[in-house]
Amino acid sequence: MSASPLHPTFIAELDRDLVATSGTTRSVQAPFTGELLHELPHSTPADVSDAFARARLAQLAWARAGFAHRRAVLLQAHDNILERREMLLDVLQSETGKTRGQAFEELYQVLSVTRYNALAARPVLRGGRRRSGVPTVVATRVAYKPKGIAGVITPWNYPLSLAAMDVVPALAAGCGVVQKADDQGALSVLALRQAFIDAGVPRALWAVVAGAGAEIGGAVTDHADYICFTGSTATGRGVAEKAGRRLVGASLELGGKNPLIVLDDVDPEKAAADAAYACFSSMGQLCVSIERIYVERAVAPAFIAALAARVGTLVPGANYDFGSDVGSLTTPAQLARVQEHVADAVAKGATVIAGGKARPDLGPLFFEPTVLTGVTSEMDCFAGETFGPVVSITVVDSEEEAILAANASDYGLNAAVFSGSTARGLRLARAIDAGSVNVNEGYRASFGSIDAPMGGVKQSGVGRRNGREGLLRFVDSVTISHATGLVQLPRTGAEFAKLGGVMLVMAAVLKGIRRR
């Protein structure tokens, strides 16, 4: 087991950047070892209120500074992140227990998000002319105004990338941010924030608070002009209710029980290697990771054998280098949930074909990547999100059966199709009920496509992050129209009688020339 490389002085400096005056703290452990990582200061509702007040003042100047200034600051932040990558990877591993490679994947996502939003904000949000109801008589433009202060509530599993995907487009759009960081991910958020502060983001513009979710997260939701939440479906419903009562917008990325369909034309060895990563990256503690596999019968024996063999070759470890393939779970609660789901499945008749055991010899929160067959609807892991290194395999007899099984879920966040034919895979992808569908990749193809929207359907959430959609959620559109003076629009019955015919001719002409 490797101790965290973070120096106590460095941690203390980050902790001081929290808006927290309560004097109370919470002990945060390093997942690799179970040792105390730091005592995290907790905020009060008054701290949240103060953070919003300061952010509102800072946001006025930030919005007036314009796109060019914000672009330059965000691009400098990108460079700062790149220069500080080793430190950020150390912080991320220390808090989450993920491998160096999977931490690097998250860091790369942050770089992509930052660069994209820096460059895309102006073309997406500068507004422009729109077709008016009566051309030449009326001219119409659309402008976009920043909503104000976004409240961002982020979880512990991907503290860098999930923060960046909400915070950076908010900043690019001219908004300020008050972020409630999870206790287990606060250091990562604060270290990332420092890269932006050093680039020129006003310190008050992006405030970070921490504390109990119901109290501090609730206070953030009560003050925000727009709300971004990533977490469980149950908590997301409460956030949505608060937002609805206040009539403010919200984007919610919630739970998932993501399916993978393996068709009978795959190379079993390659499909197994890709499936193992899709299931067990970050120990399955990823909203878009795969938890259900439906494999066509003709290839099932070869695929199942190959997957079991592949899982057996994965190298576990608590290393701050690239020497391991799978890391640790992040919290004791996650370990308990995984153990409960596996024990329940086995007790009710499921078969473990790989993994299935905790590995305290490696660290307090290690658990073997686990593959189950024979999972039925009576088992907790059948429909409930495990959010850990557990996947179930079900053999199906046709594409249609696979699609019906994949869609038979309350969730719809991510899905994947593996096929030897891209065309066949794309055809099936269009039939799956999910916000993102990957063909011959588990999740990274869509997750890394920053120019495309990301989000869920059904109980997996509302709204979208990334792409144009991710920027537009932080602004209000304003339609500005003016009369050109060329012709006076009718105001009286006599004027309508005189001009009505002309206007009808204009409508017919516009239809005839197919104006769009």
Image (cartoon, helix red, strand yellow):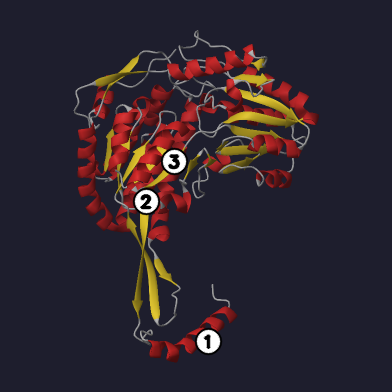
Q: Quadrant of the C terminus?
A: bottom right
Q: Earlier in the sequence, mark 2 or mark 3?
A: 3
Going by the image, does 369 lie left or right of 50? Answer: right
Amino acid residing under circle 2: Phe
Q: Nearer the viewer, mark 2 or mark 3?
A: 3
Amino acid residing under circle 3: Leu
Other residues around mark 3 within 10 Å, as few (<14) / some (14–19) / many (≥20)? many
- x and y, in percent, of residue 226 in the image: 35, 46
Give the residue number, with chain letter if any, for mark 2: 474
Give the residue number, with chain letter if any, for mark 1: 505
Give the residue number, with chain letter if any, for mark 3: 252
Circle 3 — which element?
Answer: strand
- x and y, in percent, of residue 65 in the image: 26, 56
Going by the image, does 338 lie left or right of 297? Answer: left
Residue 125 has which mark?
A: none
Circle 1 — which element?
Answer: helix
